[in-house]
Structures are given as structure tokens and as C-alpha cells.
Amino acid sequence: MVRKLIVNATRHVVRWLAVVCVLVRCSIADATAAPAHPRIIYNDDGFNFLTLGDDLSVKDLRAYLSRLRGTQVDLVAYCVAEGGYVTLHESEIADPLGTGFTTWDKVKLRRIAHNRERLRAEAGDYIGAVFSILREMKLPVVASIRMNDAHMSSDPKGPLAGQFWKKHPEWRLGAPYGYYASCLNYAVPEVRDYLCRLAREIITKFPDIAGIELDGLRSPFFFKPDEGRKNAPLMTELIRQIRGDLDTAARAKGRDRYLLRVNVPRTPELALDWGMDVAAWDSEGLVDGVSPGCYNADFQPAIETWKKSLSERVAVSAYINCSPAPAMYLSLEQYRAAAANAYGAGADGVYLFNFPCLDELSSLLPRPVNQPALPPPDFHAQCWHSDFVQTRQALRELGDASGLARKDKHYLYYVGQSPYRHYTQEAAFIDRAAPAPAELSFRCYHAANAKKVTLKLKTVGVTTREQFAFSLNGQPVASERIQRLHAPGGRDARIHSVKLEPYSQFEFNLSRDMLRSGENRLAVSLNNKEPDLTGKIELLELELQLRH
């Protein structure tokens, strides 16, 4: 009888332990679960919070992250390591930010390091506190590692330059890359090994996160000029090693697969030029998602090229930066337009880079010294900036592709000729020496239901006597649909961050059937030129506004 009771009791204990194991595994999965194809990936550089005020606490951090509640964000990418080989978490591989510095000559850098240290003292680890709060919010997060950030270039002896970088100047890419000369060469085995060890440390230290993100757009230079394709197998082996380490960690933890996502250059061809053979990664099942882009806001993402070259298993999220040009920030309507065009081109979702930088504008506003750092002051429309209180609404809209189709949008194309790090945006101009018509292509997928359609274009470096003719998708635009405005003084820093020579702005009042769903073409002809003026007429800042 006693033996029977013992056997039955043992069976109950075994069953109870099995249930506990299942519950534990479920709790692990619940804590780290992330959608296979997220709609909004929200990148935070990790520094933004640390700059918001002096003497920040975990309470402030909780208030900062709580702004994501009730939004459509379903995956956070939180930066934990800079390419200058410093980290925001407590690391044995790299230098935690501020290591070795006891005095400071820059207030902001001192504040960042001071606040990071305060969070370490209060919570054990700043990044650990971030991940813990997001887990409480049931918001999955990947640890984002910047593969080759160059912030240390402007201060090579400062706190953004880690010892690993300082000790090996011979491993840097060098002069051909200008500002990015300080980035390290991934042809060097020790550089690749460093990234592997760092990723391994992060997933060991924070096992309940959803995975790792490799930010290859900060910055997309990994090899010597013209050696990217030759060295692509080295990068593939690096990705393979990190994938293997993540899988080993997942098995040891008894949990589902860790995500491995990579931010990559704008097209598969450009990515391969810089050493990233994403198709090879996909063929081996190494990565779960990519975010292609060109750093600045791109309203014409080449998503369809990625969807053709990758399997459906790999999520493709259009990389949308907060800025289309220096010192400019997207408005709510511009975020809608960028996201709508991304979905129109086939994107699974959008990747918002530097969205928290809206706080940087708020920090420019004077406030009472006893006012809490969180929430930051509201930044309403000023100078050339839009109302950023409205802009924050984007987090509640951009995950709904069908909803965006019915909302007002403001598209920006041809915003300038400055290089986007690895990609120079297409330029349009008319050469007075041989004034052939110029053609500007632009995409839009949602004009069919718009109540009002307005197109704008600037012709830069012109007089009012120079006359132009326009056609849209092969059809002439009637003069009664066009209004011409002129700025004889051009534009400078007194009213805008982007300088322009004297220009005319043409505004086209269009009917919605004049636009196609997808690619459209505006042709511009110079009909009457000044005989004593030479050079090129730039065609800039093509804008499309849809009102519903």
C-alpha cells in the first residue's frame, strides 16, 4: 500500500514538474515573442534618453518608454553598441561609455555618461533596465549593434572611441572614405571576431530579448574600395557564425529561435557592392529580416527588388529615417507618404530610424530648471519645422497600410544631391548649353481616391523671363493648371536649412486621373532661356500633396 502511494505521488510530482517546465518555456516565449513580419520597427539609438536631462532615473526611463504604449509599434530595436567600440551596457568585450574619463569638456557627453552610470547604480545596467521595462510592456526588443558607426571621427580621443578602435589604426578603412575613414575593415579577422564576441555577450547577458540586429547602415562601409563583392564570403561567414551562436543559445535556453535582422543598403546590388550578399544569407536561412534604405528618408524605396530576390520567409521593412535633408524632420503627412509608398512597393512593414530624435528639437526649448525631463516640452511648428506633437501620431498610423491610403499625405522627391552615404539620389537638371527636356520620375499609389492633388517643383538658378513647359505621363499640363511663384533672393539659413539660389516654384493643380498608381513621370522643357546665362538649372524639391 505504501509503495503504491509512493508511486502515485511520484507520478503526480513528475506531471507537476512537466507542467512547470511547459509554463516556464511558455513564459520565456511570451517574453521574447516577436512577429515574423513586424509592421513598425522602432529604432532607438540608446543615447536619446540619456541626453534628455541631468540626473535621470529608472522612473524617467519608464516614462520615456511608456510613450510606446497604445502605438502600432510591434518591435523595438534598441541600440546597445556604437561602431566606435563602446557600449551602453556593462560589457567585458568593449568599453562601457565613459570608461576611463574622470573630467569632461563637453556637457552633453558628460551628461550621457553620468546618466548611464546613474542607471547602472540604480538598476545594475542601463540597457538591462530598458529590456526589463519593455518586457513588462510585452513589447519585443532586439539589441541593435552599429557595425561601423563613425561618430568617433570628430573626437578620436573622446569617450565614443573605444580601446579596441584606438589600438589598431592599421585596421581602419582609410582616406578614400573621408569622414568614414575611421571605420574598421571587416577583411581583418579580429574585427569580425569582435562583432561575434559582442553579439554572443549580449545574448548571454540578456537572454529574454527577441534577438540581435546588425545595423549595417551605420555605416555601410566594411571593406576597401571596390573589394566588397570579393570579400562578401567573409561577411557571409560572419553572419553564419552569429546565427550559429544564436541558435546554440536558444537551444540552451529551451526557447524558440532568436531573430537576426540586418539593416542593409538600398538595393541588393548596392548591398553586394559593399560586401553583403543577402541572397546567400537567405539561401542558408541565416537572417529573419532586412531593412533596406539609404540612411535619409527615401520616398521611392526599391522594395520590389528585395521581394524578387529573397524568400517570403525574410521580412523586408523599408528603412525610413526621420530626415529627408540636413536639419529637416519629417511631418506626420510625410511619414504617411513614405510608409504608403513602402507598402505600395511591397514592404512587409516600416523601420523608423531616429524617430526619437524629435526629442532633440524639444530639448532646444528653454524650460524651468525644476521641470521634469519627461515628458519633454511640446515642439509646435517653428521656422521650417512642422508640428512634432502631430508627428508623434505616426506611431499610431504607419502600421495600417489600408488606413494610410485614406489619409492626407505629403511626398518629397529630389530633395537634394548630397550623397546618402552609400547612395547618391538621382539629380534632375536642364543644361543651358544643350537644353534638352529633363524627366523626373516619382511614385505614388494612392491618388485615385484623393479629393485634391497638388504637385510642386522648384527650378533653381533662374530668372522670371525664363519660361518652362511641362508634361505629366506624356500629356501636356495646361497653363491654367499651373501657378508660378518666384523667390528672387533664393533661400538661406535665415528661413531654411537648405540653401537655394534664386528659384521659381511651380504649383500644379491636378485631377486625380492624371496620376498613375505606381511610377509617374514629369517632363520639364526650357522654352525661353537667358542668352547670357550659362550653367545648369536644377530641378529640386518635387512635392506631391494628396488631400482626402
Image (cartoon, helix red, strand yellow):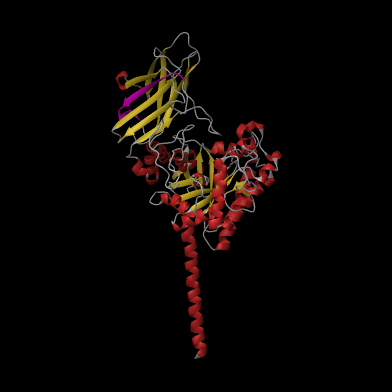
In the rendered structure, the answer to whether residue 351 lies left or right of residue 516 reads: right
| In the depicted structure, whether residue 329 falls above or below residue 290 | above
Picture residue at 29% right of the left edge, 19% below the top: 480
**Residue 426 location, x and y as percent?**
49, 28
In the rendered structure, the answer to whether residue 419 lies left or right of residue 137 reads: right
Judge whether residue 319 is colored magenta.
no
| In the depicted structure, whether residue 208 falls above or below residue 194 | below
Residue 413 seen anywhere in this rendered image of the structure: yes
Residue at the extreme left of the image, as rendered? 451
Q: Quadrant of the C terminus?
A: top left
Query: On the image, which quarter does residue 182 sit in?
Result: top right
**Residue 455 location, x and y as percent?**
36, 27
Viewer-side residue, 61 vs 454: 61
| In the depicted structure, whether residue 26 falls above or below residue 315 | below
Viewer-side residue, 298 vs 523: 298
Viewer-side residue, 392 vs 541: 392
Q: Could you tell me how many numbered marks the image carries?
A: 0
- The magenta region covers 501-515
**Residue 44 location, x and y as percent?**
49, 46
Judge whether residue 514 is colored magenta.
yes
Residue 125 seen anywhere in this rendered image of the structure: no
Picture residue at 43% right of the left edge, 43% below the top: 368
In the rendered structure, the answer to whether residue 316 lies left or right of residue 514 reads: right
Residue at the extreme bottom of the image, as rendered? 1
**Residue 144 location, x and y as percent?**
54, 48
Residue at the extreme top of the image, as rendered? 531
